[in-house]
Image (cartoon, rainbow, N blue to C red):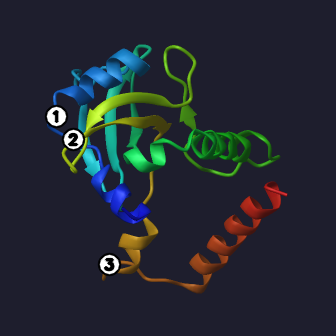
Amino acid sequence: MDPEALRTAGIPNVDENSPILPQILLEHWGVNVDCENGGIKPLDSYVDKNFRVVGEKGGSVETFTLKMMNGFDSKDMPMLSFHNHIMKHLHTSLEEPFTCPTPIEGLMGEGVVCLPLSTVGGGEEMIACRLLSWLDGFCLNSSLSSSSFTMTDQWLSSLGSSLANMSNSLW
C-alpha cells in the first residue's frame, strides 16, 4: 500500500462525540471538558483528526487544539518531536516571539502521547496525540475562499513580515 493510502486508512476513528476524547484529555493532560462552557468541536484536517477543546485545567478554563495524527505518521516520532521543538523555539527564542501554538506537555512530561485507537481503515494503531495552546484567528485556506475576506496590500505585507520573521528565527 502506498503511503497516502496508509495515511488515509490510519485516520483515527473518533469524532467530537466520542466518549474516549474527554477521557484522553483528562487522563493525559488534566483537562476537564465537563465544565461550564467546556466542549470539543472538530477542526478541518487532511489525514489527521484535530479538535478545538475548551476545558478546565489548573483551575481556569482554557482553549486548546487536540491533534491526533494518522497511524502512518504517528510512527515518525523524530518528526513529531521536531515539530514540537520548532514551535517552542519560535515562541521562546526571539526578541519578539513568533505567535504560534505551543505544545502542552502531558501529565508525565511527554510532548507526544501515543495511544492505541481504532482507525477508519478498520484496524487499531498507535496514534500520536498532541495538545497545543489555542491561537485565536482564522485559517488562511478557509479565509481565501470566503466572500467576507478581502486580501489587502497591508494584509499581504503583514503576512510577508511574519513569514520573514519566522524564517529568520529558524536560521
Amino acid carrying label 3: it is Ser
Residue position marked by numbered label 3 in the rendering: 146
Residue 14's disc is 2
Residue position marked by numbered label 1 in the rendering: 18
Amino acid carrying label 1: it is Ser
- Give the distance between the C-alpha atoms of the residues marked 2 and 1, in whole angstroms: 6 Å
- Give the distance between the C-alpha atoms of the residues marked 3 and 2, in whole angstroms: 28 Å
Expressed as whole percent of the image width and height from the top left, the position of residue 119 reads 25, 44
Disc number lying in front (1 or 3): 1
Q: Residues within 10 Å of mark 3 (few under 14, many from 20)?
A: few
Residue 15's quadrant in the figure? Answer: top left
Query: Secondary structure under badge 2?
Result: loop
Expressed as whole percent of the image width and height from the top left, the position of residue 144 reads 40, 79
Q: Is residue 117 left or right of residue 105?
A: left
The disc, 1 or 3, on the residue closer to the chain's N-terminal end is: 1
Query: Secondary structure under badge 1?
Result: loop
Q: Is residue 140 left or right of residue 91?
A: left
Q: Residues within 10 Å of mark 2 (few under 14, many from 20)?
A: some
Q: Is residue 101 above or below residue 139?
A: above
Evaluate whether residue 70 shows in this view: yes
- Viewer-side residue, 136 vs 141: 141
Expressed as whole percent of the image width and height from the top left, the position of residue 61 reads 37, 25
What residue is at 28 percent from the left and 44 percent from the top? Answer: 12
